[in-house]
Image (cartoon, helix red, strand yellow):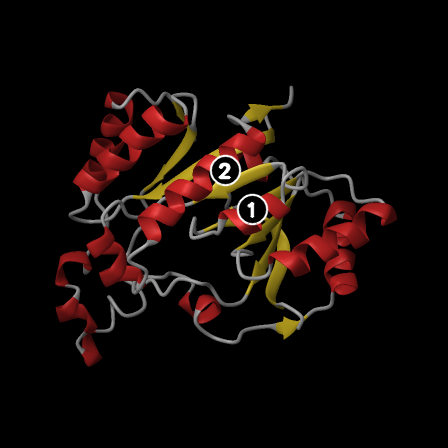
């Protein structure tokens, strides 16, 4: 079957080292293998948005984004369509695709899938959302998320190593880990940063994100979501982000997206 693409465009909302001055060539796939109750893109991740695209059509999109001056090709939530992504890349390269490939994922990836991407993906950009199984079960319906994310991130690092930059300041190859700061989860953030420092590398490049807001089921007061997830039914404050940044430094991490 063909993957469903919800949108594709030069995105200026990504990390500085990806968006540059002409944007990251972002291709959003519909659906996700997690069911995060706070998802800010729930209309894409939990619904059948967009249209089905063949490998050749996706290859054409990639080449068009390259022609428009994008600095890279950025596949968003591709973990459930890895074979189709590989087919699209294999189609596009003989037609002139030269841009770095970014694999932008929730972190809930199988090592078997990632092994298929070895030598193909230039930049891995996984989330590491939760440290505790109970939290992952409650908020993403995936109690094994912490284990799968740890395995996946270690495999990603094995393939590409720490993030490296071109002379123009753009990311060229390596691992970039995102962590979304959420209310009342500072202890889990500290555990994640400690693990990244000790089990992956102190040189791991991290983006500590402060844009959490109550969305999807968390923000649906009418059907009880706001009460069920009352501990998350507020925006992240600047102090929360500062505490997370300090926890990362305390763990020995030093490379951050600013």
On screen, residue 150 above or below 133 = above
Position in image of residue 253 (x %, y %): 34, 23
Residue name at image x 46 percent, y 66 percent: 45
Identify residue for label 2.
Answer: 155
| Viewport quadrant of the N terminus | bottom right
| Percent of width and height locating residue 83 | 65, 58
Q: Residue at x 63, y 36 (%)?
A: 122
Q: Quadrant of residue 99?
A: top right
Q: Position of residue 76 (x, y in %)?
A: 54, 54
Of the two numbered discs 2 and 1 on the same chain, state the one appearing first in sequence.
1
Q: According to the image, label 1 marks what residue?
A: 114
Residue at the image point whose x is 44% and y is 63% from the top:
33
Helix, strand or loop for disc 1: helix
Residue contact at pointers 2 and 1, CB within 8 angstroms = yes
Closer to us: 13 or 151 = 151
Q: Secondary structure at mark 2?
A: helix
The number of numbered discs placed on residues in the rendered structure image is 2
Q: Image check: 35 left or right of 15? A: left
Q: Which residue is most to the front?
A: 112
Viewed as shown, does residue 223 lie left or right of 40? Answer: left
State the image coordinates of residue 35 (x, y, percent, origin top left).
36, 65
Distance Cα–Cα, label 2 vs label 1 = 7 Å
- Graded by Cα atoms within 10 Å as few (under 14), some (14 to 19) or many (20 or more), the crowding at tag 1 reads some
Q: Identify the residue at the far bottom of this view.
A: 223
Could you say which is closer to the camera, residue 191 or residue 96?
A: 191
Q: Is residue 188 left or right of residue 205?
A: left
| Residue 91 image-quadrant placement | bottom right
């Amino acid at each position: 079957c063909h993957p469903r693409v919800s949108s594709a465009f030069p995105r200026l909302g990504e990390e500085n080292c990806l968006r540059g001055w002409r944007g990251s060539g972002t291709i959003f796939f519909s659906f996700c293998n997690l069911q995060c109750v706070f998802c800010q893109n729930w209309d894409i991740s939990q619904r059948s948005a967009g249209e089905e695209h063949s490998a050749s059509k996706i290859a054409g999109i990639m080449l068009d984004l390259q022609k428009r001056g994008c600095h890279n090709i950025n596949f968003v939530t591709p973990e459930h369509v890895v074979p189709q992504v590989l087919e699209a890349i294999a189609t596009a390269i003989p037609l002139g695709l030269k841009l770095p490939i970014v694999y932008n994922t929730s972190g809930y990836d199988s090592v078997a899938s990632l092994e298929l991407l070895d030598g193909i993906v230039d930049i891995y950009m996984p989330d590491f959302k939760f440290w505790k199984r109970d939290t992952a079960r409650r908020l993403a319906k995936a109690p094994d998320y912490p284990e799968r994310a740890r395995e996946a991130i270690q495999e990603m690092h094995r393939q590409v190593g720490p993030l490296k930059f071109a002379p123009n300041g753009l990311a060229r190859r390596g691992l970039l880990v995102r962590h979304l700061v959420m209310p009342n989860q500072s202890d889990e953030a500290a555990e994640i940063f400690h693990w990244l420092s000790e089990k992956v590398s102190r040189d791991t490049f991290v983006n500590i994100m402060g844009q959490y807001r109550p969305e999807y089921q968390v923000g649906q007061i009418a059907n009880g979501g706001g009460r069920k997830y009352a501990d998350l039914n507020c925006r992240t404050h600047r102090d929360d982000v500062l505490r997370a940044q300090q926890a990362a430094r305390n763990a020995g991490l030093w490379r951050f997206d600013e």
